[in-house]
Image (tube, helix red, strand yellow):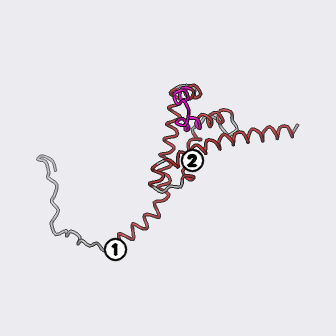
């Protein structure tokens, strides 16, 4: 009995991992095409890991082997590969049905887009300390232009009549 239970759980985990793997592959393919990833020299795999983790937090289901989560992985993968479909209009209609409504599909797309933006921010913030050190070194160099003198006195702010 214990062997059957163990085999069943293992099979569920393997299937859940396979669907997540397909989703990760679709996200990685998107990240390799993203111009911002290229422009900012972001590692596509690092961006993929972040986006998958972030989108997963807002997907239905609790774990990879949860049937709702597995369905979400399938639907998100299908959403990301929509342009490769032989009939994108038909696939879009299927996606609306698979997600349950056009609004749910829009919410899923929004979840993916917001996750990408959050990941861009997080990755850029993590890389800033290295860049700040370079900027501080550049600021320490003397400027070719002399600084403006503070010889001109500051003018006091005008006071409206009746106010002090």
87 falls in the magenta region: yes
- The quadrant the N terminus occupies is top right
Q: Magenta residues, as a range? A: 76-93
Question: Are there few (<14), some (14-19), or many (20+) residues within 10 Å of tag 2?
Answer: many
Compared to residue 31, the image places residue 99 above or below, namely above
Residue extending furthest toward the left? 161
- Circle number at residue 153: none
Going by the image, does 50 lie left or right of 159?
A: right
Residue extending furthest toward the right? 1
Compared to residue 121, the image places residue 97 above or below, namely above
- The residue beneath circle 2 is 28
Name the residue located 58 percent from the left edge and 43 percent from the top edge: 26
- The residue beneath circle 1 is 141
Depth order, front residue of 91/104: 91
Percent x, y for residue 64?
Answer: 67, 40
Q: Main secondary structure of the magenta part?
A: helix
Percent x, y for residue 33?
Answer: 50, 47
Element class at badge 1: loop
Name the residue located 61 percent from the left edge and 45 percent from the top edge: 25
- Asked whether the residues under the numbered discs 1 and 2 touch, taking CB atoms below 8 Å apart as contact, a structural biologist would say no
């Amino acid at each position: 009995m214990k062997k059957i239970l163990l085999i069943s759980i293992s099979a569920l985990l393997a299937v859940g991992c396979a669907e997540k793997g397909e989703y990760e592959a679709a996200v990685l393919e998107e990240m390799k095409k993203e111009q911002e990833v290229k422009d900012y020299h972001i590692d596509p795999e690092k961006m993929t890991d972040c986006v998958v983790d972030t989108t997963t937090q807002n997907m239905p289901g609790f774990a990879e082997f949860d049937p709702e989560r597995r369905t979400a992985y399938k639907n998100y993968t299908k959403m990301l590969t929509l342009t490769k479909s032989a009939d994108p209009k038909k696939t879009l209609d299927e996606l609306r049905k698979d997600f349950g409504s056009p609004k749910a599909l829009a919410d899923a797309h929004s979840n993916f887009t917001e996750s990408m933006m959050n990941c861009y921010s997080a990755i850029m913030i993590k890389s800033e300390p290295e860049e700040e050190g370079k900027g501080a070194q550049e600021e320490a160099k003397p400027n070719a232009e002399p600084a403006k003198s503070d010889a001109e006195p500051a003018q006091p702010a005008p006071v409206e009549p009746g106010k002090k």
